[in-house]
Image: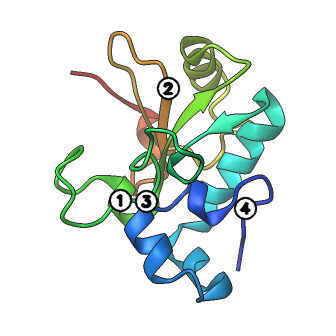
Amino acid sequence: MYKARFFQLEELAYPELFEAFSDAGDRLWMCFDPRALLTLDRLRERYGPIVVNDWKSGGGFRLSGLRPMDSRVGAALSQHKFGRAFDCKFRKADPAEVRADILSRPWSETFEHITRIEDFHGMGWVHFDVANHDKKEWGIKVVRP
């Protein structure tokens, strides 16, 4: 089982899930796709500190990682609901530059599992996911409005 090296479960899961299973130990890691977790760690190594969720420390981000299936945030079949997506707020990197870097080197080790990113005007974060998308055939899918 892959467990993120640079992130705690409460930074990746929504509060109700984390609190309901806070005594489950490592079992909550099973909710996440290991490719997404590995990519998150690699992004942290490359760009420095990243915030996904910060609700545990009193911040306002609670649905930037795993989301409940009945969440109205994002798409009905959002990859967040399947543990395959994260919204990353970089402390030392510009999100537009990170997206450009991902698209310029899609097969680098850091980005090898990323199949889709979002690029909306004014985004202050980087959404990536590891959805079932034929990256070899079509490249990284860029979701725009």
The amino acid pointed to by label 4 is Ala
The amino acid pointed to by label 2 is Trp
Q: Are marks 3 and 2 in contact (CB under 8 Å)?
A: no
Q: What residue do we see at 74% from left, 19% from top?
A: 92
Residue 135 pos. (x, y %): 48, 43
Mark 4, secondary structure of its residue: loop
Quarter of the image holding residue 8? bottom right
Q: Earlier in the sequence, mark 3 or mark 4?
A: 4
Residue density around tag 4, few if under 14, some if 14–19, many if 20 or more, within 10 Å: some
Q: Earlier in the sequence, mark 3 or mark 2?
A: 3
Q: Earlier in the sequence, mark 4 or mark 2?
A: 4
Mark 2, secondary structure of its residue: loop
Residue 39 pos. (x, y %): 67, 49
The residues tagged by marks 3 and 4 sit, at their Cα atoms, a distance apart of: 14 Å
Q: With respect to residue 117, does 71 lie above or below? A: below
Residue hosting label 3: 66
Residue 53 visible in the current orientation: no
Residue hosting label 1: 67
Report the coloring of the rendering.
rainbow
Nearest the eye: 27 or 55: 55
Quarter of the image holding residue 69? bottom left
- Please state, as top left, top right, bottom left or bottom right, where the N terminus lies in the image: bottom right
* Disc number placed over residue 4 in the picture, else none: 4
Q: What residue do we see at 49% from left, 26% from top?
A: 125
Mark 1, secondary structure of its residue: loop
The residues tagged by marks 1 and 3 sit, at their Cα atoms, a distance apart of: 4 Å
The residues tagged by marks 4 and 2 sit, at their Cα atoms, a distance apart of: 20 Å
Q: Earlier in the sequence, mark 1 or mark 4?
A: 4
Q: Are marks 1 and 3 in contact (CB under 8 Å)?
A: yes
* Disc number placed over residue 125 in the picture, else none: 2
Q: Is residue 102 left or right of residue 20?
A: right
Q: Earlier in the sequence, mark 2 or mark 1?
A: 1
